[in-house]
Amino acid sequence: MQQDIENVVNKFIDKTKEYAKSIEKEAKVIKQYNKNRDNGYKTISSVIELDGFKVRFAYHVNEGIGFKKGIVTVFYNIGNLEYHAYDVLKQIAPKDKKSLVFPYVDDEEVIDKCMTILTDTVEQYKENITELSKNPEEVNKLEKDLKKEIKQFIGKNLDGAPVPLQLLISGVYNISLLLRYTSEPYEAFLQGNYKKAIRLYNKETNLTIYEKQLVKSIKQEEKNKNKTKSTENYYTNNRKKEAEKGNFIYSLLSFLLSIPVVSILSLLLYALFVYVMTSRAIVTLNTSLIFLIVPIIFASIAVYKPVRDKIFASKMKQYMQLQVLFNTKQAKRSKLNIFNAILISCIISIAMIASTSLTAREDGIKYSKEIWDVKGTLVSYNEIQHFDLNKKQLILEKDEVIDLSVYDISNVKLEELVKVLENKNVKIE
């Protein structure tokens, strides 16, 4: 899995270097790691210095909780601040609402297509951005809009702040935009579901200028009945939904296939525990096997994934590939720990259920008063008043009753028990 993500990262770097070379520039690559989390990638950036501004292509592999994984997008550094592509386009090309944020980019083919869209867009507006960067009034408007939105979103005022702090704050703001441009309302827009997009955006507060332009454009398109589904959407959320749909189907099939196998193994394990724990018994009445249902179900849940990955691997390539973004070292350890904990708990439960079997011994009847009574209670034959054969109940002193109907009792076992009780001078009624 780690090798897979390395290949995607290398493809991202190659694409940016390829673009830089095509315009006779060089790309500076910056890699950030999640050292405290899983030693994996956080963000890979590739910076190219153009005439009057810098462009930064970014592959956000894992920004942390709350962010979608594998986001590919582009930023511009103009003057003292960094802007997301949408913040620049809303000023130089307000009608262009193409998707420039791609989440769940998990393989080389997809990142190649996404980067082609981004580099083509940079090339398309390169001269416009150069003109903007050399126009103080346009740069001032860009900065003014960004400062206003930063103050609105994160409560920080950039006025008077030194340049490094301005870059830091604008960087934090740009990261927060990844949440906005991979959100449910934006996804609805990409899918051509304009009514849903408008409804969800109307519930949002503090929309960015770009989002306000987007909502206005969506409303106009909705009014004109001109709905289009973004072709770029297939690279992003749509791929994930298709992969997860397949995962659900094959996971369910794997779970159903796991149940009979786990059931057989559980019964064998139960029989082994009974054999070991009742070695001193003359007659053994096993606890009803219905109590094994719970550990069997939980054990099946624990093992269905390796079963699924083994049997249906060829049918789940898209989902398996998507997992390179989610299966960090920390996540793998966590899943393994949960897997082991469930299996160990199931084995312990089966052992406890086996230990509650009723046994007739030389010194008395040993039974458990409840399912988790592992130690059990030993009743001498002298304490048994009589055995009600019809009701299958052992009547003890003080009118206590041992009900044998809760055990798996056959006629053969019943006859064996009756013989033991008769030999111990227990009255049979």
Image (tube, helix red, strand yellow):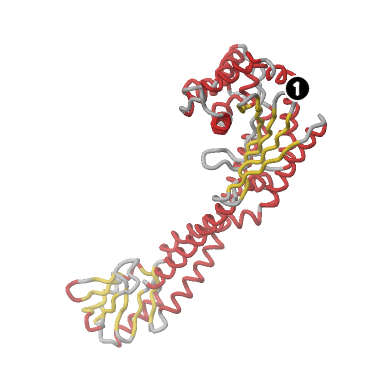
Horizontal side of 277 relative to 380 (left or right) equals: right
The answer to whether residue 111 is above or below residue 210 is below
* The quadrant where residue 24 appears: top right
How would you rate the neighbour count of disc 1 (Cα within 10 Å): few for under 14, some for 14-19, many for 20 or more? Answer: few
Residue 424 shows in this picture: yes
The answer to whether residue 382 is above or below residue 373 is below
Where in the figure is residue 10, as x and y percent of width and height? 73, 44
Where in the figure is residue 50, as x and y percent of width and height? 74, 27
Residue 94 shows in this picture: no
* The quadrant where residue 106 appears: top right
Amino acid marked by disc 1 = Gln
Tell me the residue at 81%/34% (across/down): 21
What is the quadrant of the C terminus in the image?
A: bottom left
Tell me the residue at 55%/38% (across/down): 67
Where in the figure is residue 245, as x and y percent of width and height? 60, 41
The residue where tag 1 is placed is: 124
Q: Please name whichever residue, 11 or 190, is drawn nearer the observer in this view of the structure.
A: 11
Tell me the residue at 71%/29% (across/down): 118
